[in-house]
Image: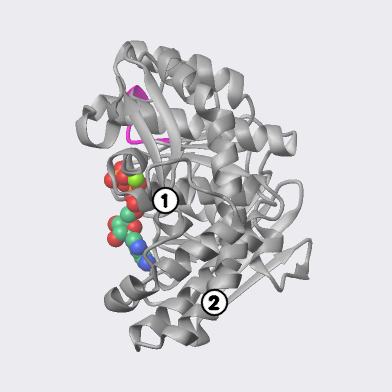
Amino acid sequence: MKLTELTVRNFRNIASLDIELPETGVVIIGGNGQGKTNLLEAIYYLVLFRSFRGAKDRELVRFGTSGFFVAGSAAARVTAGYEVAGQKKKVTVDRSPVQRMGAAVGRVLAVSFSPADRDIVAGGPAARRRYLDVLLSLSAPRYLTQLTAMRAALKQRNAALRVGRGDAARAFDGPFAAAGSAVRAARATWVAQWADRFQSTCAALGERAEASMAYEGPSGGEGNADAADLEQALAGAIDRDLRRGITTVGPHRDELRLTVARRSLRRYGSAGQHRTAAIALRLMEAAALASATGEAPIALYDDVFAELDAERQVNLLALIQDTLPGQAIVAAPRDSEVPPALLDRPRWTMTGGQLEA
Ligand code: ATP
Ligand code: MG
């Protein structure tokens, strides 16, 4: 997929930007705090209609203004606007307003590589579930609908638990189990399908110890994806849930377990191993999106090459050629931080939120 045009208004420190993007992409050079990540965040906003840094929409609004607007043309023309007043978000695809955000998610398809991806590996389980949720929302047709339904049921069940109403809470067991088991099944299936690829991608990047990936339910097993069983587990947990005021069983507590040499990567991995595994996960995300949609996603690289040793950098470039042969938007503070193989595209500079060719 290729982004041919991009328009940005009042998004972070970018006041106004209208650009045409070359087929191969661009290299964006700029000092710290000049707006490189902001630009990538604006582009990725067209994928999920949310910040890839997990920021709230109102934080994306340029200081002193009332709202932001981002538009891009790829296979479709996608626009997204947000107004602080009323907290209104408006999305259009090919000029038609979109009612359900889920229907527009993934119309622009990109994968973002960032040093912050290390949190997927080194952070808590929520970061790893989010990785799976984003990937599956963009590649599995009904996943986002089921995830949304699961979250809605969970929210209501928890609200009832907090005020000590067990019966009211249990009314949501059925809907939560129905949606939750579908979510769990999709995650477990994907992980089983791609587990070898995690091992081989880590190895191809230069990891010498064996890496593994597995989906785990609360009891350490694979995560039972049967709706009736999940409903029964919820019923069995009701006393504990009432005491704690939250739902203690379900896919919202599952784990994507990553190991190197059979030990938890999160707990025992080195900084370099964390980085390698995070990059492997992003490369797999790109491959999974490409196999689901038949098209390689746009690649957004936020200063990821500088962190790797020479060997891993060469390995990564080879993997990129295979999985992400299309458009690449590469951000870095200096030319020397960009591998020569990626420097052969137009170079633009970013200063104070302004882009200059
Ligand atoms: P680095 O090389 O350090 O990663 P960068 O070029 O990626 O730098 P960005 O993260 O894109 O930098 O931009 C950070 C700048 O954006 C900061 O100066 C910050 O003050 C500014 N900024 C962040 N949010 C907003 C906002 N809502 N309105 C205006 N400016 C903002
Ligand atoms: Mg940055």
Q: Secondary structure at mark 1?
A: loop
Q: Residue at x 58, y 56 (%)?
A: 181
Q: Residue at x 46, y 67 (%)?
A: 234
Q: Can you tell which mark lies on residue 241?
A: none
Q: Is residue 332 left or right of residue 273?
A: right
Residue 209 or 86: which is nearer the viewer? 209
Residue 5 or 204: which is nearer the viewer? 204
Q: Is residue 335 left or right of residue 6?
A: left
Amino acid on which disc 1 is placed: Asp
Residue 14: image quadrant is bottom left
Report the mark closest to the observer, 1 or 2: 2
Q: Secondary structure at mark 2?
A: loop
Q: Is residue 333 magenta?
A: yes
Amino acid on which disc 2 is placed: Phe
Ranked by sequence position, the earlier of labels 1 and 2 is 2
Mark 2 residue crowding within 10 angstroms, few (<14) / some (14–19) / many (20+) = many
Name the residue carrying label 2.
172
Residue 98 or 305: which is nearer the viewer? 98
Residue 243 visible in the snapshot? yes
Name the residue carrying label 1.
254
